[in-house]
Amino acid sequence: MSISWLLFKKSGRQSIGRLSLTAAAVALGLFVLLALTAGTNGLMGRAQHVDWRFAVFNAKQNNQKPIPGVSPLKASLYMPGNLNKWHDKEFDVMSVYAAGDHALKLPGGIKTPAPGEYYLSEALAKIAKERPEDRIGERYGTKYLGTIPASLESSPDSLSVIRGANADEAAAKDDYGQSMFVDMYKFDTSGMRAGFGAVGLALIAVGGTVLLFPIVMFVAVATQLGSAQREQRYAAIRLIGGTRRQVTKILLFESFIATLAGVVVGSLAYLVTLPLLQQYKFDDMRFMSQDMVVGWGQYALIVGLTLVLSLAANWWGMRHVQTSPLGVARKQKVAKKPRLWRVIPLLAGLGIFVWMTLPEGVKWVKSADDAMMPMLALMGGIVLVMFGLVLAGSWLTYILSRVAARFTARPSTLIAGRRISGQSKQVFRSVSGVVLALFAGSFYLTAVGGVDKLNADAVNDNGYSQLKKDTALVMVEPAGNDLAETLRSQSYVRSVEKVYRKDDNSYIPCQALPVYTRHICPDNKEYAVVNFNEKVVKTVATVDAVDKGATLSTYMVALNSNDNIDALRTLIAENSSQTANRYIISGTYAQQPHISPVVKSFAEMAYTGIGLTMSVAVCSMIVSTIGGLLERRRSLLTLRLGGMTIGQLKQIVMIESLIPLVSVSLVAAGLGVWVSTIFLSSLSNTVKPTLTLTYYCIVGGLLAAAAVGVYLVLPMIKKITSLEENRTE
């Protein structure tokens, strides 16, 4: 160890740049691993906090057996209508009714609320305090018992309610004649995970793999930077009597120091950014700070794997040093020709997606008994294609270089093609990160483009978007007391119009139509007929009279501001039965595109991951190009001494990078689009694959950035081939 440390100190100044780059690559990889692990822990912790709530759903599906000495706690997660909102965010409402003195207790040590009593989550209680005019709590009772313990909530931002129901509610039936409440004798949460299951984990696993692979390649490339100079140094040690074991120790010690520095920097970066990571919102909610952390066991495992993989990458890249002391006069070894078997994993992955397009595959996806099996098959196909591209890339590069060298008359292209065919694995490794980033980017951007298009189409498909801003449609079924005068008496209401309704058709007086909607009657008839449950129409139908059987259960309300929508919700809750179907649709929110926050979060994660992956891939390509130039300085010097100009040498290096970069990248991008198309068509009937302008800009920008990065490295050719730099060779 003393020899290793002595040599490290003596050569540290010359190697500081290479070791710093290695440490930076390791730090980046470790940071991403820690952040992904913390995020996954946060998601799993979020699910565990609300398992007790989903035990009610489980009991609804599988009736619990009575327990002697325990009275049932009647519980329900369902409330008719859509009054359980603040602005456009929904509440999770749990209604409970203790059916006896010995009824099951709620978890968390909280008292079971009696009829008229309620709890609010901390976030909802804060909103109720800041917005007293909305009177949120009065929708659920008259006595506020306090906040729900954080241990029973999925997030600090959870909007949830636990309320006490009365006996009539507990005995009520839904529209299908089913009881809305279930008898609970215990909160059985064994084996349950609410809101985040195997599908989510599979998506994160594939996304994490796609994100980490270019980083792993970056670490491997950085650790092998300057391998030619190190080979000569270590071979010289062999020449003066050093043993293979001593050379191995020196090599591993140097790698260990660089990796350890990367571990320290990556760990510190994780700790510094952890408060920011804990503020990240998934599904529009933050994570509990105690959940979104990395456990000591997980940390030790990640650090151990990082050290082992980094040391293994160094040893693998430098393993030929120990073959002979004559390595001082090392000559670059021509790699073996890549074999056709490298294409097999890629073809296997593509075969899965081809089968998914056939009638038998489509039938299997739609009718599979276990919905997870098609998902796992698709995920397996993606992983096979991803790693298949990496394996097959060197073979494709070899074939294309042979073709280019055979049909060219330019010396630069001929030399570049011959060099690529002789070192196709090494050449492709330098661009493999970009290739994989293009595949992943094409896959995710095609899917996200479909989400964006779905988001844009949501307004046109939502008939309620025909309402004007600051208006609301109020529906109460079955109709009770006439609420028109009650609504008009509110200070925040500008006007009210009674609307007849039959089935899904609303009969709106023509003189009131332009007040509340974006339409006018096209003729002089009395009523406009609008079906808000259908798509937006350009022209409304009109009639002279309302159909028989229509009821006055609907009101159109013009508000002073959409900020009054929650006060209106509370008013309707107070003046109608808890078992009635009560809906309030805001014209302001109806004109805004709505999409699942989970889908939105995955789309945001996809853009972030793609940006990081592509940045790392370009950096990896630049570093690999620098390493390749350093290894080939002798051959480049020979070409320059033979009469080649600096410009011609630059052309050779640029062609060597562009042949695999452009050709294999286009194949990867095309496969990414195709795979995403099949993936979406198999799992979704609404999200359609779409190539947006953003996609072409990102893909084109990545290729351009990679080419520019290589171009900016080319001036070093002049330095490494100068006579002054090589006078000791």
Image (spheres, rainbow, N blue to C red):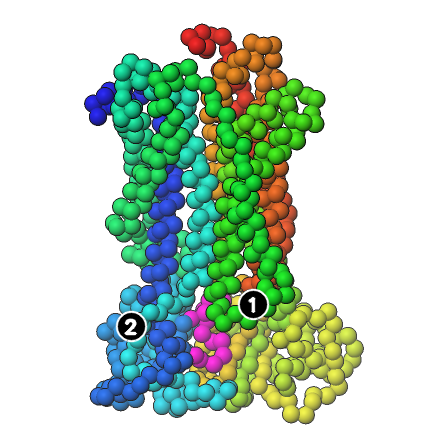
Q: Nearer the viewer, mark 2 or mark 1?
A: 1
Q: Is residue 706 above or below residue 544?
A: above
**Quarter occupied by the C terminus:** top left
Highlighted magenta segment, given as a residue range: 78-91
Q: Residue at x 51, y 86 (%)?
A: 175
Q: Quadrant of residue 495?
A: bottom right
Q: Residue at x 27, y 21 (%)?
A: 243
In the image, residue 426 lies at what x, y percent?
Answer: 50, 31
Q: Amino acid at mark 2?
A: Gly
Tell me the SS state at disc 2.
Answer: strand
Q: Is residue 80 left or right of residue 20?
A: right
In the image, residue 366 lies at what x, y percent?
Answer: 57, 69
Disc 2 from disc 1: Cα separation = 51 Å
Which residue is identified by label 2? 146
Q: Is residue 564 left or right of residue 243?
A: right
Q: Amino acid at mark 1?
A: Trp
Which residue is identified by label 1? 364
Q: Nearer the viewer, residue 673 or 559?
A: 673
Residue that lies at the very extreme toward the right in this rendered image: 523
Q: Is residue 358 left or right of residue 103?
A: right
Tell me the SS state at disc 1.
Answer: helix
Q: Is residue 621 above or below residue 201?
A: above
Find out whether residue 652 is within the magenta segment.
no
